Image (tube, rainbow, N blue to C red):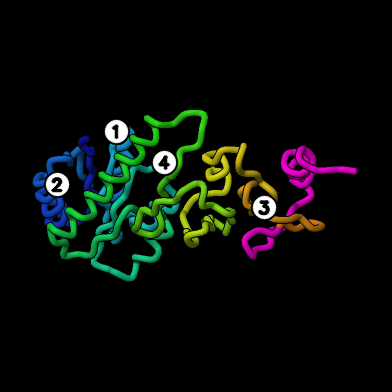
Amino acid sequence: MTLSTAIIDDEPLARECIANYVNEVDFLSIAGTGSNPLDLVQLLDSMAIDLVFLDIQMPVINGIDFLKTARDLPMVIITTAYPSYALEGFQLDVMDYLVKPITFDRFLKAANKAKEYRQLEARAALTHDNSSPGYFFVKCGFRLEKIFVDDILYVEALQNYVTIFTTQGKFMTLLTLKQVEQNLDDRHFIRVHKSYVVSISRIQSIENNEIFLHSSRIPISRQYREALMERVVNVRLWKK
């Protein structure tokens, strides 16, 4: 596996440093370089890019503002002399954050993280079928966390994030609830509210407009109540 790489930085010496590092890593190749995000747009229009090393402080438009407005970007690793941007970088779902001056060891760690993430995507595509896999990975900050499907209690949407609550803990990741719902097997999970998807097997009781599971209370909205009762309760309700 080779990752086609773009280097975007307005400082020639910084571009040269990263290019030298890229040339030392056998799974990276340089697809192009540029001095501002508009150069990156042209590169993306003309070729396939897997990974971008993106500076923040640049003319025309800085890297953070570009990430806020761009869509369908490849993996991005931020490079900057300003560590204060780390939190904002995490919120924009970048792969990693390198503070200048960048050492080769730190560069290699970030590159390996991108490689591992791409390998996980490739494995998921190869094994995708009509049944849910036993586990999956989500990106939590700069870590890839493994989550077993059977451990999931429920998923809660929070603005641009979701929090996946499991028997092993909770995991916050930059996904939408719709994306999570599409990847979970609807035979085992059900949407009960605009902000909640729950594991059917983990439901302990239902009272009025609330679900009780694992010491948590999950609201049921009017929009989803009928489907919940039909799919989960009525088919197994013992009646007199």
| Residue extent of the magenta highlight | 212-240
> Which one is earlier in the sequence, the residue at label 4 or at label 2?
2
* Residue contact between numbered discs 4 and 2, judged by CB atoms under 8 Å: no
Query: From the viewer's perspective, is residue 22 above or below residue 88?
Result: above
Of tags 3 and 4, the one toward the viewer is 3
Q: Residues within 10 Å of mark 3 (few under 14, many from 20)?
A: some
On-image quarter of the C terminus: top right
Kind of element beneath mark 1: loop
| Type of amino acid under label 3 | Ile
Q: Looking at the picture, how far across and down is residue 51, in whole percent? A: 27, 44
Q: Is residue 113 magenta?
A: no
Circle 3 residue:
203
> Which one is earlier in the sequence, the residue at label 4 or at label 1?
1
Q: Which residue is at the far right?
A: 240
- The one of 106 and 214 positioned closer to us in this rendering: 214
Give me the disc on residue 22. Answer: 2
Calculate the distance from the C-alpha at mark 3 to the C-alpha at mark 4: 37 Å
| Type of amino acid under label 4 | Asp
Calculate the distance from the C-alpha at mark 3 to the C-alpha at mark 1: 45 Å
